[in-house]
Amino acid sequence: MEVKTRFAPSPTGNLHIGGVRTALYAYLIAKKNKGVFALRIEDTDRGRLVPGAVEDIVETLKWLGLNFDGEVILQSDRKKIYQEYAQKLLEQGAAYKGEGAVWFKTVKEGKTATFDLVGNRQIEFDNSTQDDFVILKSDGFPTYHLAHVVDDHLMQTNPVIRGAEWISSLPKHVMLFNTLGWEIPNYAHLPVILGPDKSKLSKRHGAKAVSEFRQDGFLAEAILNYMALLGWTPKNNREILSLNEMIKMFDLADVHLSNPVFDVTKLEWMNGEYIRKTQNSKLKTQILEYLKYLAGGAIPDHPTEGEVAKLTPLVKDRIKKLSDFIPLTDFIWEKCEYDMAVFEKLGIKNLGEILDKIIYTLEEMKQPWEGETFEKKFRGLADEVKISAKDMFQLLRVAVSGQSVTPPLFESIQILGEEETIKRVKAALSFLMA
RNA sequence: GCCGCGUUCGUCUAGUGGCCUAGGACAUCGGGCUUUCAUCCCGGAAAUCACGGGUUCGACUCCCGUACGCGGUACCA
């Protein structure tokens, strides 16, 4: 039997970070079994539709690398089909009309039990607790229950992978499958992801749309990897896993039954790990693409591709997110802003005098400057003015960038160029004199 | 309230009756390396395995109960 999974979000907003895990697991199961992974948009609640949501979902899945097979399936296109089945149930006497809607008459005797692939466990309900429910709303659109049963039967989805918030509706679905005479698919219900305060993960936890994580500078691979680990660990307990490795090792039976808490800090760490293990040339491209994405598709004047290429190896160990690239490097092409407090923090006396000597040394040094001579000269000057080499280099850093944290000093100066460097140290001096 | 599901360091987790005086990762703390910040390396602290009863020679692991948490209880998904 072919394995067919589907991700079925409702377009009530942009793709939420929690949805990534559901989509990913469905994707992994499909790929693991050389099956099909489809995207179905559950847009039957016409009042809650958000313009652009479908586009965001499609675009985000693409960015994540979770490519779905076939065309996007829209439930709103399938209205007629659901109505036919509702009619059929009506004719069968399994449903009835009431207040403009079609209701399903539940079986009140016995029990409904289903097997869940997550944790390989049995879930049981007493049918006496099951009230009749609406399958076709008065606007002619189906409710989730009818749409799910009809679609997943017609699409031959197996297993059905969805959030645990659906567990309580299981008896409804099973009854529907049974009275329609259809085979019940296997189900896999994923525990709901919680925020740090242990309530359902939502926008107010700062854990928002995937597109916002993208804007924050997170890598698709890191997001995927982190989300995969939220409730699942591979047998060998490894943490950094490529998509292919996940496909090989993933098993629904190993997914935890308890609700995991989303922890951005670990995501950030993982993102940093991914950045560090990326090849420089690829990382350069990613930074460039990221900057372009931030600018809404426009290519900014600075940094240029060449600047990014030079800067990439220098910042690689210092950034956790692509966005960290900007504050670390923008002093190079932005106008240098000085802050008295930053100079004072150095704790050096005679700043003006020393700066004067620095300028002299820089001007005297043979161009192009070389790292070794540069270091030697300034270690010498540090001795001469009786400050530590450490303080000397830190002073240079601040004079040249206005910041106390930058990529490696000499390399930054090289990108800046001799002329600009001298100009900035002079500017620093006049700032201090003013 | 009722129904369903769950409960190992702050967080993600390993653990399927003896290997556990509970292991790893993130975060945190201390140290090393270092011209900043990082990276990297070393080390520490951190779970009476929610609690109470069983079962067993033996329980984190099995059973029951309690507490707590989460989900559902819509013509929302």
Image (cartoon, coloured by chain):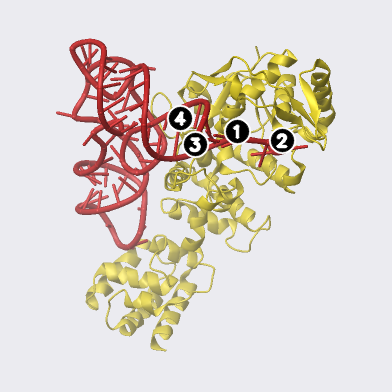
* Chain containing the residue with disc 3: A
Q: CA distance from mark 2 to mark 1?
A: 14 Å
Q: Which residue is mark 3?
A: A225
The yellow-coloured chain is labelled A
Q: Earlier in the sequence, mark 2 or mark 4?
A: 2
**Residue A394: assigned label:** none
Q: Residue at x 49, y 36 (%)?
A: A225
Which x, y percent locates residue B70? 49, 39
- Palette colour of chain B: red
Q: Earlier in the sequence, mark 2 or mark 1?
A: 1
Residue A156 appears in the picture as rendered: no
Q: Which residue is mark 1?
A: A23
- The residue carrying pointer 4 sits among few (fewer than 14), some (14 to 19) or many (20 or more) residues within 10 Å by Cα, namely some
Q: Residue at x 56, y 43 (%)?
A: A17
* Chain containing the residue with disc 1: A
Q: CA distance from mark 3 to mark 1?
A: 13 Å
Which x, y percent locates residue A100? 82, 34
Q: Which residue is mark 2?
A: A42
SS state under label 2: loop
Q: Nearer the viewer, mark 2 or mark 3?
A: 2
* Chain containing the residue with disc 4: A
In the image, are marks 3 and 1 on the same chain?
Answer: yes
Depth check, front residue: B74 or A389: B74
Q: Which residue is mark 4?
A: A232
Q: CA distance from mark 3 to mark 4?
A: 11 Å
Q: Split into 4 quadrants, where in the image is the N terminus of chain A?
A: top right
Which x, y percent locates residue A395? 34, 73
